[in-house]
Amino acid sequence: MMHALCLVIYWFVCVFSYVEAAEAGGSPTVVTPSGTILGSLMTSRRGRPIHAFRGIRYAEPPIGELRFRLPVLITKYKEEVNATAEGPACPQDADPGYFLDEDCLKLNVYKPGNRNSTSLLPVVVYIHAGGYYSVSGRSDVAGPHYLLDKDLLLVTINYRLGSLGFLSTGDEEAPGNNGFKDQVTALRWVKRNIESFGGDPNCVTLAGYSAGGMSVALHTVSPMSKGLFHRAISMSGSPFSQIPRSQELLSLALRQARLVDCPHSSTRAIVDCLRTVPWRKLGDSLKGFRDFSIDPIIIWRPVIERDFGQERFLTEDAMVSIREGRISSVPFIVSQTRDEFFWEAFLVLDNFIYTSLINSDWYRVSPIAFMLPSPSDDAAAVLREAYAGSTCGSTRWTNSVEANIGANVWSRPYVGNQSLENNTEDARNLGKLYGDAVIGFGVHRLVNLLSYQSQPTYRFVFEYMGNRSHYEDPATRKPVGVAHHDELIYLFSLRVAFEDIPLSPSHDSVMVDKLTTIVYNFARTGDPNPLWGTSPPTWVPFTPSNGTHLSISEQYTLGQDWYKERYRIWEQLYPLDYSLASL
């Protein structure tokens, strides 16, 4: 059953068994259906040996004629795979010294190294964040040192980014979604090979953060992903927000072509030329997609593919799939941080040019910064008022919008029509709008849609502000909120940015135990309980009637209807009947 413990005993011997060479002083080696793989040793936070297999190629190199093509799963390696070092990250706009290469479709497998039991372990496959144009599955940004103190296997993956992964011309030249298809191919590799590492192929938890969290939700409705995972964790990411799904992304393909001086007279001309452009030039062109500050945060999106005989990742709008029951209904955890993208407001207001633009041209900037569908003047007016510090009138509201939103909105202002200034109050209010627009409202939609499915959905809000953060006050170097990505500090070692959290009685150290226990319990059983600690509460699933979430800080707290009043404004601007998902 879905909720049974993933403790299946090997019934076969030696065929594709794990070779425990490390305990004898050698390197760990595993023989899989695809071939022999040589690994290396790492050590967990608590001193447990980890058998690490890094940089395993799971698909043919997507170069040359395979650029913009579907990934090709590797089913048989021609020789022993040396998986003792990190593979490259996929092309992106990164520091020149960072290891990048177009030949990047590789994954890492981490396994506890001191187990005597032959029982199969639950598997967590992690899809990294990065807006579909940055980051990677490398161990410096998703290290195993915390989670591998638990009895589970961790798999981290790379997938193609930017135009190399998500270019779509809407026709046979580039149908789109190749980055998502890379993720599917990695899952197929896991299903084929993970048992040889001691992992249970029938107990796979698909987890992701931000763009990775959006991906997880999309995999639940993709026909390509069916049967490849059995639980899901979507952290700070959702494809269901105020933005309608695009049928195709031809405008982005045209923009990419112009940025690298490719002809754009036809889709074939675009793709043929882009196939010859050096990968580093494509990765470095990201700045050309920015229209305001670092916005839009989300550039590349999933596309509903037309049928040209190819295997399609999305065949219809994901919302339609859920509402009509075409979904892999699995136990789900959905989460967000308290403040999410609040820090972007500080970046904007700390820059005189951006502050002047957002004050003088709110109706042009808002759709870019807050991902509003066009036309959006009415929505921009309502949202400015909704996230202000004082009540101000507006002449831009239409009668229809005023009637739909109601007087209650005008009595709860947020940003108002006064000029925004570089001060803490304005930054906090604008930060709320950024947080809700980019992440919060989409997560709210996702958890409500999932709550009508047959499997339980658990929601948590990460409210812990520890000694480190992805956004710190530049003057004090201290955290000023609970930012997007902050819970990852306690799930993975992030050596690209932070030192490891040592074992100690500190709150940071305890938070590692809290979050890794949640992931471990959920990966084993589909239920995150019992929580770590002395006499913790029982975390109950979210339902439309209870609106329950678990607040995770120094203490656990069960709450209801997170940011209900703020999200009500968005619901009235972009209404959706969630109950249709139960039909």
Image (cartoon, helix red, strand yellow):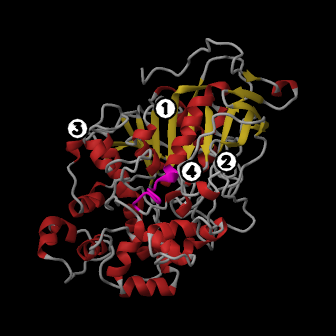
Name the dominant secondary structure of the magenta segment: loop
Instruction: Say left or right for 184 vs 169.
Output: right
Instruction: Look at discs 4 and 2 and give the one toward the viewer.
Output: 4
Residue displayed at 46% across by 73% down: 254
260 above or below 563? below
Look at the numbered discs 4 and 3 and tell me whether their residues touch, using CB distance below 8 Å. no
How packed mark 3 is, by other alpha carbons closer than 10 Å (few <14, some 14-19, many 20 or more), is some
Residues in magenta, as a range: 170-180
**Residue position for label 3:** 582
**Residue position for label 4:** 128
**Which mark, residue 522?**
1
* Quarter containing the N terminus: top left
Instruction: Say left or right for 150 vs 413.
Output: right
Between discs 4 and 3, the one toward the N terminus: 4
Q: Is residue 361 magenta?
A: no
Q: How far is the residue under mark 4 from the one under mark 3?
A: 31 Å
**Which mark, residue 493?**
2
Instruction: Look at discs 3 and 1 and give the one toward the viewer.
Output: 3
How packed mark 4 is, by other alpha carbons closer than 10 Å (few <14, some 14-19, many 20 or more), is many
Instruction: Look at discs 4 and 1 and give the one toward the viewer.
Output: 4
Instruction: Say left or right for 555 vs 442.
Output: right
Q: Quadrant of residue 185?
A: top right
Residue displayed at 62% across by 15% down: 10
* Quarter containing the C terminus: top left
Which residue type does callout 3 highlight?
Ser
Secondary structure of residue under mark 1: helix
Q: Is residue 171 magenta?
A: yes
